[in-house]
Image (cartoon, helix red, strand yellow):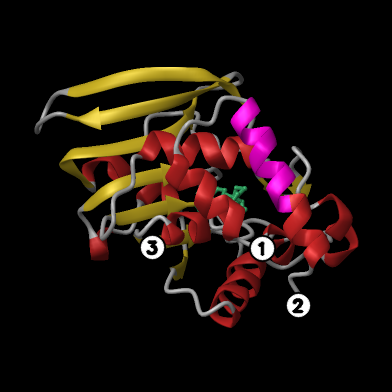
Amino acid sequence: MEDTYRHKGLRRKMVDNLRQLGVASEDVLKAMGEIPRHMFIDSVFDSQAYMEKAFSIGNDQTISRPSTVAQQSTLLEVFPGSKVLEVGTGSGYQAYVLEQLGADVYSIERQKFLYLKTKDLLASLRSRVKCFYGDGYQGLAEFAPYDRILVTCGSASWPADLFSQLKVGGIMVLPYGSPKQVMTKIVRKDETNVGVTFHGDCHFVPMLPDRIGENFHVV
Ligand code: SAH
């Protein structure tokens, strides 16, 4: 798929808009300014790819809107070489943003159709993101511990298994609560203590424990 002058122009406007919305991390703005977001979205939505809006990516799931990706990426404080676990691969866009920020990304998706589709897409972009099919609520113990954990679906209850895979000194960002979700940042101070800050209401598809829906897709 091509990255045309028109796409580049729309992308610059998206970044200007993110600045106006208060996104302060130059690293995040640079990464999002370089990544062809339209390639992560069904081509019928091509003209809207850079708008401040979420999109259907099939199986009734969505790619987060640009300001949400920017907020989560900023809160996560990724550093070059950091080992990051993402829950909810979805379109792969957020994972790719984290990779551009220098992270070594492990991403889990519970819907097989999305897992397969996005794994191929990321490979075609020569991405180093490692995709896994499974239940992110349980994390990915095989490669733990992680410097950072980013949850991109709503967690109604405390994901204890996931948290246990976070390094001491690590940061976890997750949409937490039900039915209302709040963007929550957890800093693991030591084995037993955490620091918690809240960063506004948010609306993510719920984190679901099993894999219903893997045999059908709504596109
Ligand atoms: N990060 C994505 C946004 C994903 S939307 C992007 O950049 O496009 C949320 C995703 O979380 C959906 O794809 C959904 O299928 C997935 N999901 C929901 N519950 C999950 C679970 N328990 N484990 C892994 N993924 C889950």
Query: Could you tell me how far apart the alpha carbons at marks 2 and 1 are, in whole angstroms?
Result: 10 Å
Q: In which quadrant of the rendered view does residue 124 lie?
A: bottom right
Q: List x then y, in percent, for residue 117.
A: 65, 73
Q: Indicate the quadrant containing the N terminus: top left, top right, bottom left or bottom right.
A: bottom right
Q: Is residue 49 visible?
A: yes
Circle 2: element type: loop
For this view, does 210 lie left or right of residue 56? left
Which residue bears the numbered disc 2? 1
Residue at coordinates 78% horizontally, 51% vertically from top-left? 10
Which residue is the extreme one toward the left?
191
Which residue bears the numbered disc 3? 106
Circle 3: element type: strand
Q: Mark 2 and mark 1 in contact? Answer it, CB < 8 Å.
A: yes
Q: Amino acid at mark 3?
A: Tyr
Report the predominant secondary structure element of the magenta stretch. Answer: helix
Say if the magenta span includes residue 15.
yes
Q: Earlier in the sequence, mark 2 or mark 3?
A: 2
Disc 3 vs disc 1: which is toward the camera? 1
Residue at coordinates 37% horizontally, 39% vertically from top-left? 76
Q: Earlier in the sequence, mark 2 or mark 1?
A: 2
Badge 3 crowding class, 10 Å Cα cut-off, few under 14, some 14 to 19, many 20 or more, is many
- Magenta span of residues: 11-20
Q: List x then y, in percent, for residue 99.
A: 43, 61
Say if the magenta span includes residue 87.
no
Q: List x then y, in percent, for residue 30.
A: 51, 50
Badge 1 crowding class, 10 Å Cα cut-off, few under 14, some 14 to 19, many 20 or more, is many
Residue at coordinates 60% horizontally, 60% vertically from top-left? 35
Residue at coordinates 66% horizontally, 64% vertically from top-left? 214
Of 157 and 61, the residue lying toward us: 61
23 shown above or below 153: above
217 shown above or below 74: below
